[in-house]
Amino acid sequence: MVKVPLTILPPAEVANPLWLSVSEAARIAGVQKKTIRRGLDSGGLTFKVVGNRYLINATTLIMWLLASTKLRNKFLHHGFGQYVEEWKK
């Protein structure tokens, strides 16, 4: 496996951001829902509340995951990131 240096850039303003539920964010990230809820409580994730549900901005979710080594590894090995190598083929 080749290690590629990771550069995190600030998010650009997106005209139509992608909003994810807590369970969708957890599946994409490869973590449990309680981990996503901790991110909401800590202020690490941008969200809005619609009805009684949290909707999480996908851009800030990815940035939050990549900022922590533990979360980055879970994302790359158990979440959405595990499929990236297959897409490169």
Image (spheres, grey):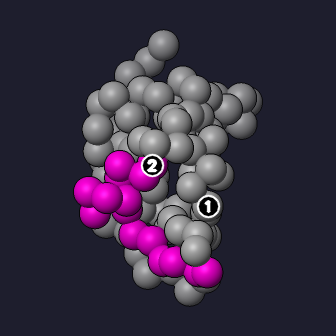
Above or below 21: residue 83: above
Viewer can see residue 51:
yes
Task: Find residue 27 and report its image quarter.
Answer: top right
Where is mark 2, residue-wise?
A: 36
Q: Residue at x 51, y 35 (%)?
A: 31
Q: Residue at x 53, y 68 (%)?
A: 54
Nearest the viewer among 79 and 31 is: 31
Above or below 17: residue 68: above
Tell which residue pokes out farthest to the top in this image. 1
Where is mark 1, residue-wise?
A: 21
Q: In screen coordinates, is 46 left or right of 32?
A: left
Per the image, label 1 sits on a secondary structure element best described as loop
The number of numbered discs placed on residues in the rendered structure image is 2
Q: Is residue 78 magenta?
A: no
Q: Residue at x 40, y 34 (%)?
A: 72
Q: Position of residue 84 (x, y in %)?
A: 63, 35
Q: Position of residue 36 (x, y in %)?
A: 45, 49
Amino acid under disc 2: Ile
In this picture, which residue range is highlighted in magenta?
36-51
Viewer can see residue 17:
no
